[in-house]
Each structure stands twice: as structure tokens, then as C-alpha cells.
Image (cartoon, rainbow, N blue to C red):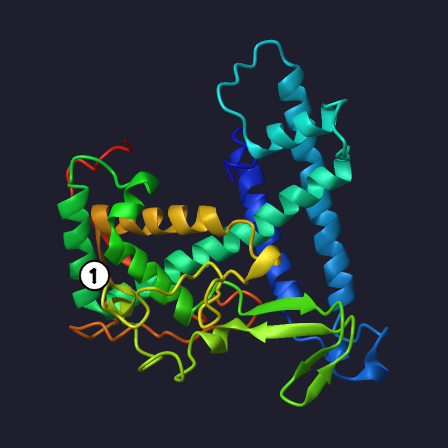
Amino acid sequence: MRMVASALPGHMTEAARDCAKQVAEVVGAFNLEDYVALCRGWDLQGLTRRTREVRDKFDALLEIMITVKEQERRSPTTAKITKDLLDILMDAAEDEKAEVKLTRENIKAFVLDIFTAGSDTTATSVEWMLAHLINNPACMHKLRAELDGVVGTSRLVGEQDVAQLPYLQAVFKETLRLQPPAVFAQRETIEPVHVRGYTIPTKTSVFFNIFSIGRDPAWWEDPLQFRPERFMPGGAGANVDPKGQHLQLMPFGSGRRACPGMGLAMQAVPAFLGALVQCFDWAVPLPPGQSKAPPLDMEEGDGLVAARKQPLVLLPTPRLNPLPTPP
């Protein structure tokens, strides 16, 4: 959120998160009209109405954000050291020499993409990684040992450390394989394509099941097991690039239409998980009357984003006193 609008008031941040969640729910909901032609146009489930409501709600929020930013930019007392995304977009819109003039609607569309595609997917990935580590204590111990050995305990792990933390990267890649943030990628053909005796006509929407690709036993040994070591040197996936260069693992899609936030995610998400593991011990709350917590339920929920069916509830205990500060 701070990347988009650094001075966004707290209540607006919560409103933006709520809108992004509603967008993900509407987009990923089962729609009868997609399968039964006779139902089209009737909105029997109310999804069209709800989609319009969410759109109008988000549009009103974005309008307020842009208005607040315009007032901030006009204020002579505003001291701006670094620019957020909204500043950059508004600079481009005000550039008289720009070949392509950004409109207010263009700015809203950019911000909407960041909120909807960047917030829910990031939180989901961190949640899945932490859940896998809780269910696999040996992996948690190995990751923590790497963090303590490379970063230490006097400062907080940051994005600049990720390149020197191969096991942290392996944990992220293994989580992307099992639970990619988006379960499908969609493309449209620009010419007829022939695949295994089938002809796919021009202008046909094609959906790729990214979720199943990462679990294909033809490519991955014991595909349902969480095993980050497969991405370490000597492992079967050591040379597999999750950025779309290898089709057995493409959590961000592939080609020119791949996720534009891929580079940021590969740095920021592992760093965030690293900070959680570095600074805290994590435990599952004990059920009433039990002395040992059962393994976490790893079932996925419905929707376009592969979120957990059950929310992840853990108890954090600080393991460093005082907690390290950012570099």
C-alpha cells in the first residue's frame, strides 16, 4: 500500500484491502452463466450486480486517493523525499511532452491493478510459506540457521540479502510450485494453433492450469510433498527458473504477458518471510484438552487466488530481544 500512496490514511488502507478482497472473490466466484447459455443476461446469482457495486466502491476510493494526492502536491509545506507510485503516475499525466497522455481513468486502472493483483497474492504466498514451515519443523530449523548464519541477529533481513540466502529462495519456489498465487493464466490466440490433433481457432481464450502444472508427476518427484531441497544445488529443480523460462514451473505466467510484479515479488516476499522467521518463534494454538497441536490443514479454498480454506492462526513469540532494526 505504501508503494502506491505513502501518505494514505489508515482507514483508507483498510478500505483498499477490503475492496481488493471483494474483487478477488467476485472474479473467482462460480458463475452459472459461464456454463449454461440460457442463464446469460439474467444475473440469477447476483454476480453482475455485486461486480458493479464493488467497481463503484473502488472507483470512489480511488477518486479520494487521487484528490488527496493532488492537494498534497499543491501544498507548499509538503516535503517529498521519495515518490510513491501515485506521484510517478501523476508526473507522467502532467508531462506535456509525453507521447502518450495518461488520463485520470488510466491512473485509476494502474492503481487498481496494484491493489488487486499485488496485495492479496503477496499475503497468500507468505501465509502458505509459513504454514508449510510449521508443518515441516526441519525446514524451519534449516531456514533459521541460514538466516542466523548469513544475516545474524543484530539487524533485520532485507531484500538485499535474498541473493545470499539460497534456502530461503528454495522455500519460496517450492511454495510457488504447490500454491501459485493465481491458479490460472489466460491467453488469447492470434492465429489458429494445432495441438495434438486439435485446432484452436483464432481469438480463442485459452486457460493454463498453473496449479496442476506445478504438481505434475512427470516433472516433479513426490509432487505433493513440500521439499525445498529440490531447488537447491543438486536437486531436480536447481536450474528451474520460476520466471516463466521453464514451462514446468510458471507461477507468474510466461512471455510478454507475464506478471509485471514478478521481479518485485521474487525479492520482497522472501524477505518478508525471512523477517518473520528471524524474529519470531511460531506455534499452533493448542485445541482444548490436547497437549499437542495437530498438523495444519493445507486445503485450498475457492477463488482465483489460491488462498487457504481455513485462516492461518499462529502464536508468535519474540526470539530476539530487542528485535533487530531494518538496515
In the depicted view, which residue is nearer to us: 56 or 291? 56
**Which residue lies at the image location 39% right of the left edge and 79% below the top edge?**
219
- Residue 8 lies, in percent from the top left, at 55, 32
Q: Amino acid at mark 1?
A: Met
- Residue 255 lies, in percent from the top left, at 58, 59
- Residue 183 lies, in percent from the top left, at 53, 70
| Residue ID for mark 1 | 140
The image quadrant where one finds the C terminus is top left
Judged from the image, the secondary structure of the residue bearing numbered disc 1 is helix
Q: Taking the image as drawn, is residue 285 in sight?
A: no
**Which residue lies at the image location 75% right of the left edge and 23% below the top edge?**
97
Compared to residue 301, the image places residue 96 above or below, namely: above
Compared to residue 309, the image places residue 97 above or below, namely: above
The reply, left or right, for residue 278 in relation to residue 158 is left
Q: Taking the image as drawn, is residue 159 in sight?
A: yes
**Which residue lies at the image location 39% right of the left edge and 47% below the top edge?**
267
Q: Residues within 10 Å of mark 1 (few under 14, many from 20)?
A: many
In the depicted view, which residue is nearer to us: 184 or 44? 184
- Tally of numbered discs: 1
- Residue 217 lies, in percent from the top left, at 39, 84
**Which residue lies at the image location 68% right of the left edge and 39% below the top edge?**
62
The reply, left or right, for residue 140 in relation to residue 46 is left
The reply, left or right, for residue 305 in relation to residue 173 is right
The reply, left or right, for residue 94 in relation to residue 255 is right
In the depicted view, which residue is nearer to us: 144 or 56? 144
